[in-house]
Image (tube, helix red, strand yellow):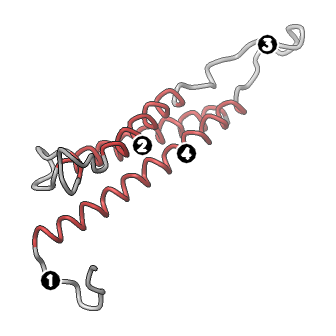
Amino acid sequence: MAYVLDFLAIAVADLSSIAERRTDRMLDPARSHGLPAFLADDPGVDSGLMIAQYTQAGLVSDNKRLAVPASVDSIPSSAMQEDHVSMGWHAARKLRKAIENLRRVLAVELVTSARALDIRTKLSGGELTPGLPAPP
């Protein structure tokens, strides 16, 4: 069980890293295809979503540390009666924390994506989709 939990933590760390990179791409004017820096209303004065991306970076870094396998660790216990002790409980606790971090990373990506779509709609001057209300 510990092995499976450890492998899931590795996948969660990778997913959180991918989401953060997508956010970074939306915030970087050199790679966002016309979006303002940090999706700010007034780049240079307004920091936009820069701090949100910093938050993501910290959570991703935490997930990388949480992806270090617990299952490879075993310490004999009970006066050497148990020579191999599963670290499944610890693997489960690490995975739970990594999933909490991933939820937050994805939330920031969704907020960033929504902001980018709002800005893109204003930039393109496109028509509204029939049936949807006009923005304020």
Determine whether 20 is above or below 67 in the image: below
* Distance from the alpha carbon under mark 4 to that under mark 2: 9 Å
Q: Mark 3 points at which residue?
A: 83
The quarter of the image holding the C terminus is bottom left
- Give the left or right position of residue 104, taking residue 49 as reference: right
Q: Where is residue 40 in the image (x, y as percent from the top left)?
A: 23, 53
Q: Where is residue 38 in the image (x, y as percent from the top left)?
A: 23, 48
Residue 53 figure quarter: top left
- Looking at the rendered structure, the kind of residue marked 1 is Glu
* Distance from the alpha carbon under mark 3 to that under mark 4: 31 Å
Q: Given contact means CB atoms under 8 Å apart, are the residues at marks 2 and 3 in contact?
A: no
Q: Name the residue under label 4.
A: 99
Binning the other alpha carbons within 10 Å of mark 4 as few (below 14), some (14 to 19) or many (20 upward) gives some
- Give the left or right position of residue 82, taking residue 113 as reference: right
Q: Which mark is residue 127?
A: 1
* Distance from the alpha carbon under mark 3 to that under mark 1: 69 Å
Q: Residue furthest bottom?
A: 131
- Badge 4 or badge 1: first in the primary sequence: 4
Q: In the image, which is nearer the foreground, mark 4 or mark 1?
A: 1
Q: Residue 27 carries which label?
A: none
- Badge 2 or badge 3: first in the primary sequence: 2
- Badge 3 or badge 4: first in the primary sequence: 3
* Distance from the alpha carbon under mark 2 to that under mark 3: 36 Å
Q: Residue at x 61, y 37 (%)?
A: 5
Q: Residue at x 24, y 90 (%)?
A: 130
- Badge 3 or badge 1: first in the primary sequence: 3
Q: Mark 2 points at which residue?
A: 16
- Give the left or right position of residue 77, taking residue 97 as reference: right
The quarter of the image holding the N terminus is top right
- Looking at the rendered structure, the kind of residue marked 3 is Asp
Binning the other alpha carbons within 10 Å of mark 2 as few (below 14), some (14 to 19) or many (20 upward) gives many
